[in-house]
Amino acid sequence: MTYAGDVAALARKDLLLELRAKETLPSMLLFVVAALTIFHFALPRGTGHQAALGLLWSALIFTALLGLTRAFVPEREQGMFDALILTPCDRSAIWLGKALAVLAFLVAAEVVALPAFAAFFSGLDGRTVAAVALADLGIATVGTLFGAMAVAGRARELLLPVLFLPTAIPIVVGGVGGYLWFLVLYDAIFAVFAWAAFEYVVAEA
Amino acid sequence: MISARGLAKRYGDKRVFAGIDLELEDGGFLLVTGPNGSGKTTLLRVLARLAAPSAGELVLPERHTIGYLGHEPLVYRELTPLENLTLFGRLYRLPERGERIGMLLERFGLWEVRHERVASFSRGMQQRLGLCRVLLHSPSLLLLDEPANALDADGLALLDGVLAETGHTWVVSTHDPAHVEHLATQRLAFA
């Protein structure tokens, strides 16, 4: 229960920070709606559902990247990693709390993005919604790990896209194709990897 | 409490310090002095286990028994003092943390502003909150990097009260040692 309590306290902290600062979620919402609007007018009439789905997934991945870029801003600007890693809480709890907050932001952005997509394009089926939900888990777990790595590095604005976008390719493949089991497998592998690796990301330098 | 032999730290080709030997007993007070950029902050980060030494042997207490105040107060600016200390009280597994938090906020003159965002505080008030965070879990080893930074006369008086507390081991760095010189049991001067 202690581990779960630590994770809950850390996730609550991140949600509170966003509630106060209102920096990440409004940007994500504006970006995803603007991107879908541009795609709507850019795509020729009569384009197939599969092509529209591809654009949806592109918009979601870049929206997630926008959110991940901001995920560790308080820890970076206020040196909070130092204070957090001195506490006796497991370091993976820091990652999991942050990943849950990122997941909440992704879901909030998609609550707006998916109806917008359905209105602009050819509707939305349950399989796509399930794929988006599974993709969110993978994006939050691996993206949070890479977000922490980027914060520790020098060229952090460049490092996150360079690390994250290649690992997001399988998510797009699974999402566009509707391969739900593939997404489940991706989530499981990267969740375990990120959980185990975070310890070393915030290790002493 | 702290034992170091031949302690050294390098960042790439740049040597920050080398050959530091230390034996600091429980209850001791190590005063670290030197000009800006001489390596004081890096030494404190090594002693806080926030940076690994490049060479040497180092014996330190458990990480969670250390209280570390860096150049920044290490509190979330968009949270209130109460929310910050409640979060860290939870992570330090403090029983009855509400009472301890209330006592610290009272002592450092922050009780009245406990529901206000830290972002609206002056740097001196943030430093006071940083001291509250450091003392929250009653650490046995306190590492304070330029703790008098931004404190006004009242804040300095509060800091003096903290530094006079027994039951802790202290490592305090400053470029202006006059204020704490009388407390030191050991000194380490960086050139």
Image: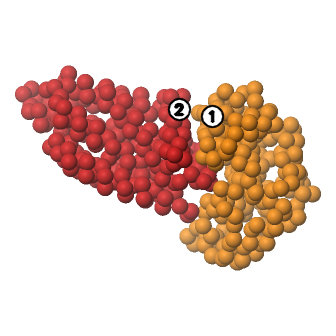
Chain colours: A red, B orange
Q: Residue furthest right?
A: B182
- Residue sitting at x 70%, y 39%: B96
- Residue sitting at x 88%, y 64%: B185
Q: For the residues labelled 2 and 1, say whether their Cβ atoms are less than 8 Å apart.
A: yes
Residue B115 screen position, x and y as percent: 67, 27
Residue in the foreground of this view, choosing between B138 and B73: B138
Element carrying mark 2: helix
| Mark 2 → mark 1, Cα distance in angstroms | 10 Å
Element carrying mark 1: helix
Q: Residue furthest top?
A: A119
Disc 1: which residue: B83
**Considering only vertical position in the picture, is A40 above or below A64?**
above
Chain of residue at mark 2: A
Indicate the amino acid at tag 2: Leu
- Residue sitting at x 53%, y 32%: A16
Q: Residue furthest front?
A: A1
Quadrant location of the C terminus of chain A?
A: bottom right
Residue A112 screen position, x and y as percent: 31, 25
The label shown at residue A141 is none
- In the picture, measured across the screen, residue B101 lies left or right of residue A149, that is right
Disc 2: which residue: A16
Residue A45 screen position, x and y as percent: 9, 26
Indicate the amino acid at tag 1: Glu
Residue A91 screen position, x and y as percent: 52, 54
- Residue sitting at x 63%, y 76%: B55
